[in-house]
Image: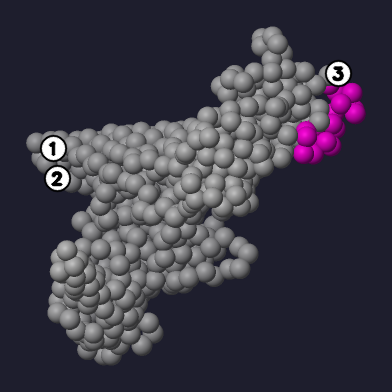
Amino acid sequence: MKIMLLKNLVMVAAFLSFGIAQAQDVSGTVSDASGPLPGASVVIKGTTTGAQTDFDGNYAISGVPEDATLIFSYIGYASQEVPVNGQSTLNITLQEDAQALDEVVIIGYGSTTIKDATGSVSSVTSEDFNKGVISSPEQLIQGKTAGVQISQSSGEPGAGISLRIRGTGSVRGNNSPLFVIDGVPVSNESVSASGADVGVGSSESKNPLNFLNPNDIESMSILKDASATAIYGSRGANGVVVITTKSGKGGADGQWNFSTNLNIAHVANKYDLLTTDEFVERGGADLGSATDWQDYIFRTSASADNNLAYSKNYGSGNVRATFGYSKQFGVIENTDLERITGRINVNQRFFKDKLTVGFQGTISRINDRAPFVSRTSGSLGDLLAAAYYSNPTLPSNPNASAEPDRNPANLLEYYDDNTNTNRVLGNLSLNYDITDEFSAKLNIGIDKSDSSRDQVAGPQILALQNGAANNGRAAVSNLDTENRLMEFTVNYKKEFENSRLDILGGYSFQDFNRKGVNILGQGYGSSDLNQIVKTTEQAYDDTKNLASNYQAYGIGVFADDPDAGNLFRVLGLFPNPNVATRGLPGIPIDAFAVDTFDTTDELQSFFWKSKLQPS
């Protein structure tokens, strides 16, 4: 017995020693024929783990397996794959890639090749995109371009994504780049209704690019510096991301394509908390049950992404039409994102190919469900905190009291948060070649969306300090946006014996309108969460005409802010607080507040650029 135990210990020690020996630190310098290359990418093959070289071309990566292969890459250079083979130092010299230098990249109001680009431009095509169930276009290029940092605000499906090009440029201002989709600059503000605090704290913003199906994207170009982004003015101060969608280039006889992806996700790690017995032994109250609250709120989720596409090239033009359906479930209960998209790209040439007409259009529906989770809810405030702090002897009954702590089962059962967003993006372009050197282009675009969000904490909710307990609280928010674009450009290109001249000038008009309403109610006679939402909407319908001249109004008394709803009762505009009883007998609302908004920003500009360079 002792011999067997000794053998087992030796085997475990050998295994641990072998595992430790497998991982090591690797560092070195990446150069070209002229010297060190700053911003080069070094990635462990088959993973997203890697680093970028600093100003002196140096890099360092920790935890590299002995049998790993490192991929060294830089725009305009041929990539190299180098086996580690136990080496701790790898110095690499990259060679220029002639084919890569001729790669076409999309820039402001046109295109060029990498070797002719005067500014810093990176381009990632669909062949190099990240794979899997991707909820947002930014995730396609995560870890693919030097100097671009991409991070998600939370693990929730559809959560906001931060994209920074060469770091943060402003302490207080917006650091997001400008996104241009098929020639239409789109606002980087969220187009999803914002919601309000019904007891969970402020909610996370949604990603404004979720509406775009990642499978429809052909390439993404990153314009990084002033020379590359100057044509967009101050909007390009944080860089520009130019997104080009796929067209029907292949398949003269028509081509159908179908793809599907399945993704399984689970929580990578859980906190090592006290068991029921350990909790009671240390003086905790014994309520008679044994509940692992982390297991209760977490789940293993299966998400699917399905895409159907038809493309055809018929000589004088091409067409591509797609339909996509994606359902992504989060690892927390009551968390999911559903995306339904349709897209069509049409290009047609007329008048002996002098006139080219193009149309790109996307229509989408995003349905998002969020849990009782917030960064501003405090240590005991939300669903996650409740799962970590709650008494493990508390039964998994939504109505079991856990005060002063919160019951995770209660927060799952009596809180609901749903957002529905419809969006249409369309772009019509007409390009006419007046002569071999001289051309003109008209571009008209529109981007419209409507979004509604319903957040409800029912009267059965426990341990909330804002008055929702025994009263209920609901927030209904609506947001409509419209972005209109009209651009006209003329372009002169001339090839001389040993040089090329490129001159472009134009006019651009664009306006952005955002309007909507935020409604907050408290004190409901129903425990039906759907009925509470209808009551809140009915209250707004009953009062909006009476207070149509006011930007904000309210009645009644909110538990956490007694003055918030009393304004128009004082003025005598509303005789009593029970304004939501019409059509809903016996379902009153005690306090009610409304805030409306309607803003428009307009941009008009004239611009020109010229470039003379050797051929």
Cα distance in 3D space between marks 2 and 1? 8 Å
Element under disc 1: strand
Q: Identify the residue under disc 1.
A: 255
Q: Identify the residue under disc 3.
A: 575
Element under disc 2: loop
x, y percent for residue 199:
65, 39
* Rendered position, 268 above or below 542: below
**Whether label 2 touches label 1, CB < 8 Å:** yes
Q: Identify the residue under disc 2.
A: 250
Q: Which residues are magenta?
A: 558-575
* Rendered position, 274 above or below 496: above
User: Can residue 5 be spotted in the picture?
Assistant: yes
Dot 1: within a 10 Å radius of its alpha carbon, few (fewer than 14), some, or many (20 or more) residues? some
Cα distance in 3D space between marks 3 and 1? 66 Å
- Camera-near label (3 vs 1) is 3
- The kind of residue tagged 3 is Pro
Cα distance in 3D space between marks 3 and 2? 68 Å
User: Can residue 361 be spotted in the picture?
Assistant: no
* Rendered position, 38 above or below 303: below
- The kind of residue tagged 1 is Gln
Q: Residue at x 19, y 40 (%)?
A: 259
Q: What is the count of numbered marks?
A: 3
Q: Is residue 592 left or right of residue 276?
A: right
Q: Residue at x 61, y 68 (%)?
A: 171
331 in the magenta segment: no
